[in-house]
Amino acid sequence: MNIHEYQAKSLLKKYGVAVPRGGVAYTPQEAETVARELGGPVWVVKSQIHAGGRGAGRFKGNPEGKGGVRVVKSIEEVGKNAGEMLNNVLITKQTGPEGREVKRLYVEEGADIKRELYLGLLTDRATGRVTIMASTEGGMEIEEVAHNTPEKIVKVAIDPATGVQGYHTRKIAFALGLEGKQVGSAAKFITAAYKAFIDLDCAIVEINPLIVTGAGDILALDAKISFDDNALFRHKDIEELRDEAEEDPYEIEAAKHSLNYVKLDGNIGCMVNGAGLAMATMDIIKLYGGEPANFLDVGGGATKERVTAAFKLILSDSNVEGILVNIFGGIMRCDVIAEGVVAAAREVHLHVPLVVRLEGTNVDLGKKILAESGLPILSADNLADAAEKVVKAVKEAA
């Protein structure tokens, strides 16, 4: 789960991470009020969407205009720019051409930026540890730095038994070229960010840029936090920060039914039980010349109702021209899947080719239910047969 910049900064501040003062606004008038409370002489008006590259982005209908992050020098300019940004669609390289509508802003005090650095925390799957990444190339995407100048990235893996230690923070501070009191400030900053990462069950904490001010202070000028969805049950206060307007409506609907769903660009819908089997199913569809329209894992203990919801979710995508159901019944029973497929197909008036491959527990009963349904369902003997049949059926129906 992702949250907005202002929410991330509010959480980090509670742990002692230094951030500039600011406030959220939903109208130009609220933006001006926040600016007055902060005092001048410089403010930054920031669009709040779940995407990076806001400053370099452009608003739809005004491709040559200002971006989604603007530095202004009067209360009047704060209100004027807020009016231009709110309720307009901001397009960045991370949003795609459809962009995201800006529904809230963050008005922040200006900062005297001397240097821009990068700091990030994430779980490194190779080491199985939380790893702190830092770079002198702040303000740039870390992927670009890794590709063009990898030597400018320092990585420190933290042993969970000890947590972050002084020698960790000093190594990072020295690699960033910090001096004097800046080293102590960086140590405090990094330690606080690490504690927030652990306590809040984060997937990513990214500070880009981390700035050194003219006075030598270290601040998080921007902040991004992503949380591990599997741990949200422990953080009801964090879950309340969710902004569903920023999320894929298909994925929101899937979550309501405990389905793992990711929309893709193809035209063959997939319903599978198990993430590994789902990946293999998508791969074999591509092998036979098709393109998967989604990743959808109904899980090992799906009910008839969950299967019905999954089927309806697939068909709600207008790009879907055929469906492949691939079930291996271990914990999941094939007859339950068959009942869900039949119920959903009847409810939505199935209008695209449907291929079903069942194996495992109660497979014969499942196949019998499908065969006696009276629906035009194509049965497959194995995964390769299923993929070949659904790709062929979609091409013939086109």
Image: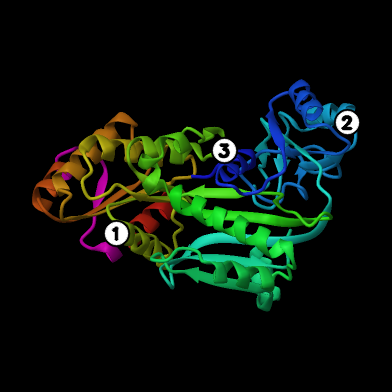
What's the amino acid at mark 1?
A: Ala
Q: Nearer the viewer, residue 108 or 215?
A: 215
Q: Residue at x 70, y 56 (%)?
A: 210
Relative horizontal placement of residue 106, taking residue 280 as reference (left or right): right
- Label 1 crowd (10 A; few <14 / some 14-19 / many >=20): many
Residue type indicated by callout 2 = Glu
In front: 324, or 169?
169
Frontmost of labels 2 and 1 is 2
Residue named by callout 3: 246
**Local secondary structure at mark 1:** helix
361 w.r.t. 50: above or below: below
The span from disc 2 to disc 3 (Cα, nearest Å) is 27 Å
Residue farthest top in this picture: 29
In primary-sequence order, the first of circles 2 and 3 is 2
The span shown in magenta is 370-386
Whether residue 349 is visible: yes
From the viewer's perspective, tell me whether residue 177 is left or right of residue 80.
left
Q: Residue at x 66, y 42 (%)?
A: 98
Q: Is residue 381 magenta?
A: yes
**Picture layout, residue 252 above or below residue 139:** above
Camera-side residue of 229 and 178: 178
Amino acid under label 3?
Glu
Q: Quadrant of residue 128?
A: bottom left
Earlier sequence position, callout 2 versus callout 1: 2
Residue denoted by label 2: 77
Q: Which mark is residue 143?
A: none
Decide whether residue 131 is among the magenta residues: no
Disc 1 designates what residue?
A: 386
The CA distance from mark 3 to mark 1 is: 36 Å
Q: Nearer the viewer, mark 2 or mark 3?
A: 2
Q: Nearer the viewer, mark 3 or mark 1?
A: 3
